Amino acid sequence: MEANYAPLWESLGLDLDAHDELLRVLGEGYSNIFLSQKDRPEGMAYFDFVMSEVHGLRIKELIDGQKEGRKVIGSFCVFVPEEIVRAADATLVGLCTGADFATDEVDKLLPRNTCALIKSAFGFKLGKVCPYIEAADLLVGENTCDGKKKSFEVLDKLVDKLYVMDIPQMKSPEGRALLKAEYARFKKAVEKLTGIVIDPARLRNGIEITNNKRRALHRLNSFRSADPAPISGLDALLANQVYFYDEPARFSESINKISDELEQRIKVGEGPFPKGTPRILMSGCPMAVPNWKVPWIVETSGAVIVGEESCVGERGTQNLTDDTGETVDELMDNILDRYFKIDCAIFTPNPDRQQHIEEMYERYNADGVIHYGLQFCQPYQFESINVEATLEKKGIPALRIDTDYSVEDVGQLKTRIEAFIERIA
Ligand code: SF4
Ligand code: SF4
């Protein structure tokens, strides 16, 4: 980073030494994993820049926006409706984190059998290295899995700006009514925070901004069904991760530029991996920045990832919100319709997810599915058993892996993933 952001980070209460160390490790990892790839689309230079400035320029933009009255809302889950946040001229940023930090302190506070994603979010808070948590005016926690639900009781003691949203566990009329009531309550909370009353025009605008981001990613992903794939899975994952941080219009434009490039690449049969490279669909727990471990292993073991059935991927972005409607109530119902379709493993039963995995496998011309579960993630680990068995029964090769954010199991994972790739090649 060229600019000196130290005063900005200091003003947010970050531990500058620890934060410097985090950026050093991240920068090194990024360079080894991303910049070492061959034949990347030129448009990825934008994402390299975004990542190099993810704790710098982007934070400065958010703080500058706050000075002009734009609030920042941090979220841990794709159930938090971005449309409502944008309708109030506020910014939504993702807070899930993908690296271990301050683990000793985290282990004193949370049970050891907590998933790495939750532990990581706490580690970033306790280690004072996340400018997004510190800069946010409101943090939205959601009652999804038990780990998150109970951890928010702990987080509530560490921050004074936590808002907890209840989330249904069944796709029943009662579940829908619960989510409807929670979205109405959230809209009121956002209005109170921003001082802006959300009218139909504002809500429609929020829907349009959010849909445009999703549309752009849909377009990019559509090109990944080609052989050779015109973009690596790592770069596509990065685009999905940046989705949670970047300014929406700039993000959509950048994704559309890369998509133009991918379209040209397909015409001439160009891509980072040769035609005929085994193709993997990843499925399972979300991979937040900088969780690149398994995709990196897959793509350095002779395969290419062609899709992500994940909240940092298609589970999070797959449906658009209908923008037709004259009243706030009608538009809020459209938002509800869209989010109630999210097939997160916290729902029981959850047949839509199985169907989505199979549909993605076909659509992306994949050769096999790797189910990615974080250790101690009960919802996804439970589902993975049935997902694997059902896929195999249908003749779809599947590999189930459970891991965390450490590098200790890299060798073992590589051996298993290489054997799987050999099986589907
Ligand atoms: S996996 Fe479930 S709990 Fe996690 S971000 Fe997605 S919807 Fe939310
Ligand atoms: S990875 Fe699993 S256990 Fe962890 S927060 Fe997400 S749903 Fe909960």
Image (tube, helix red, strand yellow):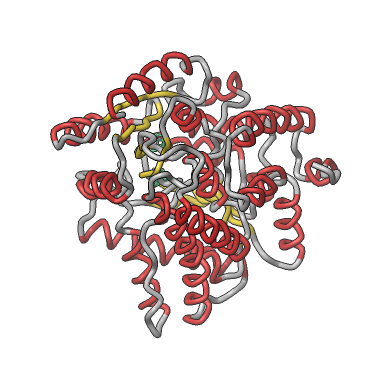
Q: Position of residue 143 (x, y in %)?
A: 39, 45
Give the quadrant of the N terminus: top right
Q: Is residue 359 shown left or right of residue 63?
A: left
- Which residue is more in the foreground, 257 or 213? 257
Residue 44 appears left or right of 165: right
Q: Is residue 125 visible?
A: no
Residue 207 in the image: above or below residue 167:
below
Is 119 on the left or on the right of 69, as rendered?
A: left
Compared with residue 421, is residue 34 higher up or lower down, i.e. above or below? below
**Count of labels in the image:** 0
The residue sitting at the front extreme is 268
**Which quarter of the picture shows residue 305?**
top left
> Residue at left 43%, top 40%?
286
- Pick the residue in front: 140 or 425: 425
Q: Quadrant of the C terminus?
A: top left
Residue lying at 61% horizontally and 38% vertically, measured from the top left = 158
Q: Residue 5: x and y, percent?
A: 82, 44
Height in image: 50 above or below 208? above
User: In the drawing, does residue 65 fall left or right of residue 206?
Assistant: right
Quadrant assignment, res 374: top left
Query: In the figure, residue 173 lies in which quadrant?
Result: bottom left
Which residue sits furthest bottom? 326
Residue sitting at 54 percent across and 44 percent down?
Answer: 238
Q: Position of residue 281 (x, y in %)?
A: 35, 39
Please state the quadrant of the image where ligand 1 appears: top left
Q: Is residue 328 visible?
A: yes
Which residue is at a point 38% across and 23% down the rendered structure image? Answer: 417
Residue 47 drawn at (x, y percent): 63, 48
Depth check: give the residue in front, 410 or 386.
410
